[in-house]
Image (cartoon, rainbow, N blue to C red):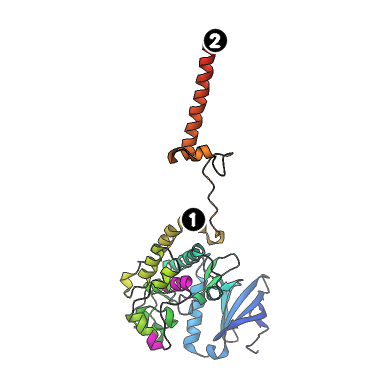
Amino acid sequence: MLMEHPARIGKYDVEAFLGGGMSRVYRAQDSVLGRHVAIKILTDAAAGDREAKDRFLREARLASSIAHDNIIAVYDFGEDSGRPFMVMELLEGESLREAIRNQRTGDVARKLRIALQVARAIAHIHSRKIIHRDIKPENIHLDVEGRAKLMDFGIAKSEDTQLTGVGLTLGTPFYMSPEQVLGQDVTTQADVYGFGVLMYELFTENKPVHGTTIEQVFDQIVNQAPDLEPLHEARMPPATIDLVHQCLAKQPDKRPRGMRIICEALEEILGPGAIRLRPAAQVSAPRPVQPRVRAGMRGELPEFLRSLPAPLRTPGGLMAITALAMLAVILVIYLLFFSRA
């Protein structure tokens, strides 16, 4: 069977090739359940590499154990003619990389909502003792409803799993933490650093690290402080700039202690609108705040009311004025009635 376009993988009828390199991704239909899915399968060359095959199977096991609105769902995995494959939900939309490149990430509030969803996804896998180790825009998908989904657990590992050799430095160079570059023990704090790089790029469309060689990139990651000026130019809220700065700290213990703290910080920055992000399927733009006045009095206040002191222009103040006016009318009627008696 030719790897370029297999007709069938397991019980799945292949419909189209979607992309890939060492592994290929296809659109397919489950012949039993009838639903459309995405199938990721190793190429013949990769399947013959013991380390690549083990890493693929580890990704399938890790990803299939996770259920979260902001993480791609893995339904099944197995082998077909000696090639391991995994079956995932079929996502419509685009990667965060494409959205950044085409300037489709929206305004500051929209960017913050994307960041919050990604932070929640990372916090969830950390609660499952899983470290992603490759947080970058290519591994975030934005669906047609604006929901962010974390993908690709190819180099993720459980906290109790020890990887040796090349496994210690796997990752995309620009998004690697200093401890990954130095081959030190990698904890969940590496994902905090990667999230800081992702936020920097989300707002500025540029990475905080530049270089034409691996040596230059690694030197900047380990030794040079990030330039925060582009964050100010992007009109990021000051609290967000501080958060990104903390995430990019060289020492793991200087970064925010876990993604839950980052989620709380982003929710506070977003304000009440962040509440509607739970669950992620309900993500929507905050509704316009309606004037806080009684029905029948919405819109611009009359001139004589606008001239009142500020405390009296509030709903409580207007109610007090109305009550006093009614009492005055009653008093006048009372006095007129008894003056004639």
Residue 190 on image: x %, y %: 38, 74
> Which amino acid type corresponds to the residue marked 1 in the rendered image?
Ile
- Residue nearer the viewer, 165 or 180: 180
Q: Is residue 278 visible?
A: no
Mark 2 and mark 1: span between their CA atoms? 63 Å
Tell me how many marks there are.
2
- Determine which of the numbered discs, if any, sits on residue 275 in the image: 1
* Residue beneath the point at 53% across and 50% down: 289
Is residue 126 in the magenta section?
A: no
Q: Can you say which quadrant of the picture contains the N terminus?
A: bottom right
Residue type beneath disc 2: Arg
What's the residue at 49%, 86% (across, down)? 52
Q: Residues within 10 Å of mark 1 (few under 14, many from 20)?
A: some
Judging depth in this view, the residue of 207 and 214 nearest the camera is 207
Specify whether residue 215 is painted magenta: yes
Q: Percent from the top left, x then y, of residue 249?
A: 34, 73
Horizontal relation, residue 27 to residue 148: left or right: right
Q: Which numbered tag is attached to residue 340?
A: 2
Residue 337 placement (x, y as % from top left): 54, 13
Residue 16 shows up from this direction: yes
What span is colored magenta in the figure? 197-216
Q: Residues within 10 Å of mark 2 (few under 14, many from 20)?
A: few
Residue 46: x and y in percent read 53, 88
